Amino acid sequence: MSLAALDITIPAVALEGVTKTYGRGDGAVRALDEVSLAFEPGTFTAIMGPSGSGKTTLLQIAAGLDRADRGTARIGATDVTGLSERRLAHLRRHRIGFVFQSFNLLPSLTAAQNTVLPLRLAGEHPRRRVARDALARVGLADRARHRPAQLSGGQQQRVAIARALVTEPDVIFADEPTGALDSRSARDVLGLLREATDRDGRTVVMVTHDPVSAAVADRVVFLADGRIVDERAEPRAEDIADRMTELGA
Amino acid sequence: MLGLGSRMLRTRPGSFAGTFVMLALTATIVAAAAQIMATALGAPGPGRFAAADAVVRAHPTVKLGSGDNADNVDVQRAALLSADAVARVAAVPGVRSAVGDIAFPLTVVGRDGAPLPTRGAAPAHAHGWPSAALTPYRLAHGQAPASAGEVVLDAGLARAGGFRVGERVRVITPAGAEVLRLAGVASAAPAQQERQSSVFLTQARAQQLSGLGAGFNAIAVRADARTDGAQLRERIRDAVGGDPQVVDHRHAAAADAGDTRAFDRVELVAVLASGGGITLAIVVFVVAGTIGFAVERRRREVALLRSVGATPGQVRRLLLGETALIGLVAGAVGCATATALFGPFTDALVSAGIAPDGFKVAPHWIPYAIALAAGVVVALLATVVAARRALKVRPGEALVESAVPPRRMSVVRVLLGLVALGGGLTLVIVLASQAVSFAILAAFCFMIAVALLGPFVIGWPAVLAGRTLLAGGGSGFLAGSALQTGRFRVGAVGAAIALVVALAGTQAISLATADHATQRATADRVQAGHVLVARAGGGLPPAVAQEVAKLPGTRAAGMVSTDVFLLDRHLTNAGDSWEAAGLDPAAARGMLDLDVRAGSLDAVRGTGIAVSDTLAKDGAKIGRVVHARLADATPVRLRVVAIYRRANGLGDVVLPRALALAHASAALDSAVFVAGPARGLDAIVRTYPTAVVRSRAAYLHDVKAQAQDNAKAQWVIVALMIAIAVMAAFNTGAMAAAERRRELVLARLGGATRRQVIGSLTLETIVTTVTGIAAGVAVALASLARVGDDPAGGPLVVPWGQVGVVVAGAVALGLLGTLVPAALVGRARLTALAGLRE
């Protein structure tokens, strides 16, 4: 009980003074500039901002996919900035789930095989029902044997979510998960992410530039030129759209 | 992970096609070369000595150099053994019978006065009748030769000449023309009769007509049953004395003085080892590039795997597992292909004179295993390097679609490129005196440098050309921008084309230069009005020169083409013999002008020799006594008495003719130079129908034709390298097209017409091809920069016709290799491709 109480005080994901620069000399671009940000467990946060504002960089550094030049990134109590590639891989397998805009699935594997890939990489041999249950949850129980090329874009994203959930991770990072989808598929995908927070208590961090998508989140963080410029709780789509227009997006 | 890898291979075979093809090619080359070499290195079989248990010959091995660097070279025909030696061998316990064997070339003249055709791409050989039992040959008609005037022909010759027992038969022997009575016809197993045509005389008459004097080329032994072979051979060795060579039944053909096949196998191994080595190096290089490209294309896949928790080790194992699988399957396909290609390939080697007549590959499992292992090992090494690079990229970077990392030359790559460049320069400068021989190797070194430094040496010129294109039209703009951003791609494609041009160009130019130098030196040297040569290669009996000299007002000089081993340090010709000519300088005066620089040719007699200025530079000064071995491995001390310049086409050593004749592999003149009226020559040719009279001009023309014939042999191996380079060019072109696929689709979606896309590709290809050709030409010229310092070379001669063909071929290759794959993209449905993710 006391441990659980303690857990609440530790953010699921935390960035402190993260700075990242791409390139050198005149061509250098500062993608993130002293960004500090925390994500509480069981919350759904949307990160918004114009193109080039550093959204994706922030997500990738938080997830240990990229390294910060300065500052630290934590997943729970683990500092990912100093981890070896091997330890990072283990972290991703067990505590992190990813959903990208596209190319989420290995084309040579079926939906079911893609879904349990993180478990397979961990050396487990999951029972068939693990994949079936995970796919059933995203409404694709009947597509288990299909390959990505035989699935629609929305279905592919749902398989990606099934894969992100299969390891029961602490955090799910989603980078423009609806960017390539029609509005109905987008709604399905957002609903699944929302459900991961509400039902399972997962922390979701989602990069998006779509105000309607962002409105699903508990909180929206606005980035511009590598800095946090604003934050809204319980946002409405219209407010978000207005704020984005102000930011010049 | 292997399961995952094999699933990727099964579902997406296309993306592995390039790797597969190049690996299968590697295995094909390794398997074919290794099988041929294994067969050539294996026992040559008993040959004519099928009924013998062991064969003895005088020590045939010449040791050149000392210590670990020593080269042991066997001569084709060893010195003679005495009749005493035969008697001593016969007395060895366990020896049932010992036969002194003689073998020398002999021509049977048909009724129409023309030489009879023979079997096995060689002249007929004569032996003493006791040798007939060694095969065995058995009398089909008539009797064994009982007197000096009698002869037995094999069934093939008797049939070809339509001779019956009792008829007169004219023969040309090293000792002169003879008329003999056909005592009988003998036949052997069909394989032997096809192998070489045989003629039998009495033992004494055979010795006399061999032109080499009393003695035997070999002693063939039949053993008592239940005698241990190895012990028997040891006893025989002791009985003969003087360190003879004793070979068992399986190696007996090596001791046949009349059969060069076993000897030629050694040459074949040397040629394949050097040619195959370079070819393999090219292939390894291309395989590495192909695998690197294939891994690079899967950057996003690797990133995705890592984002879902694959460790770098897992990714590496996945890539290695895949490659090992491809390597194994490709290796098996390569071995099968090699097996199918043995026939045509050995035929080509035989017809070019590299492999001995009748050479057949006897496949063994070890070369196949080597080929399989070679394919897998090469593939794995290339993958280790490629995986290292792929894993250096952080998954975050790889996943961002726009962030294709700007490619940079790694320090290691630049350093290796500079090392290769240094190697090429060293070869050209240090080995300038052997520039012709080392031209291809130098070109190869330079090409490694060009390939490694391609983004600089080919990429930058293409960027400059691209800049000028930017201004012109839609196609020009597209092409120009592609050239500016694709230095690595352009460098790779250009280097592949440059490789073809450099290899073919270097070969064509160096051969033409060497030929031209030989022809010029020969033209300067040969002043004789007429030359008698053998009609079908081989040589002329020394008697021909004597008879010509007897004609009123006519002088004649026979020349023996042979070789000699010089054993002294710096004079060993890198483990090979020196070409030598046996001449009587007094007779040759006014007919051969060797351009003597020091000493006098008149002193070339006894053991006095003349040497070329090349040898003189290496230390063979006038008055120096050198340790040498003659062509039959007989040790001899020779004294340098003259130094001459015009060695090209003659040889670097001039031996006294008598010495050369006594130790040559056959006591024959390769040419008889004639000064004075040619009237009587026709009569001599009627007596010796193997001879033919050539005017000086016709003789010089023959020399040229002969050079072109020899060039054919050199082209066989280089053609193999060029074929590989062509495959490499196609492969690189296809990879480049695959890399640009998305870009081209985007250009079309952006409103470019198909014509503009094709136009832009054509422009880009032309720039790439022209740059590649220029690089190839530069490499060829650099490799041959010092050819003037090679005594076998001279001023650079460019065979414009051949070079034109090479350049045209390179243009076609460049256009086809890039445009065909690209055209396939152009035809595909845009909608399908636009959805293409990677």
Image (tube, coloured by chain):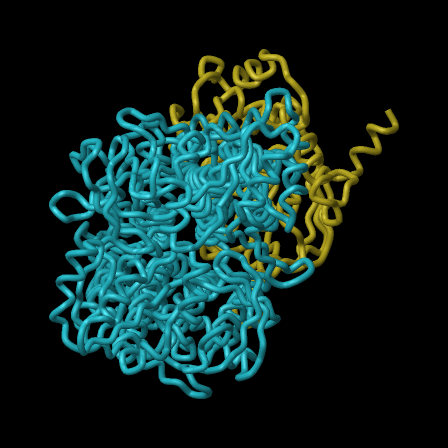
Residue B158 coordinates in the image, percent (x, y): 22, 34
Number of marks: 0
Tell me: B683 left or right of B19: left
Q: Nearer the viewer, residue B65 or B116?
A: B116
The image quarter in which residue B493 lies: bottom left
In this orientation, does residue B310 appear?
Answer: no
The N terminus of chain B appears in which quarter of the rendering? top right
Q: Position of residue B183 (x, y in %)?
A: 27, 34
Quadrant containing the C terminus of chain B is top left
Looking at the image, which residue sits at the far right? A2
- In the orientation shown, which residue stands out farthest toward the bottom? B598
In the image, is residue B610 above or below residue B22?
Answer: below
Q: Is residue B692 left or right of residue A2?
A: left
Which color has been applied to chain A in this rendered view? yellow
Residue A144 in the image: above or below residue A208 = above
Depth check: B242 or A233 in front?
Answer: B242
The location of residue B27, given as percent across then percent down, is 46, 38
Is A105 above or below relative to B345?
A: above
Q: Provide residue B461's location: percent of width, then percent of height.
A: 36, 71
Residue B316 located left or right of residue B614: right
Q: Nearer the viewer, residue B488 or A28?
A: B488
Is A14 or B87 nearer to us in this picture? B87
* Residue sitting at x 37%, y 74%: B584
Residue at 63%, 29% (x, y): give it: B229
Q: Is residue B789 visible?
A: yes
Q: Colour of chain B?
A: cyan
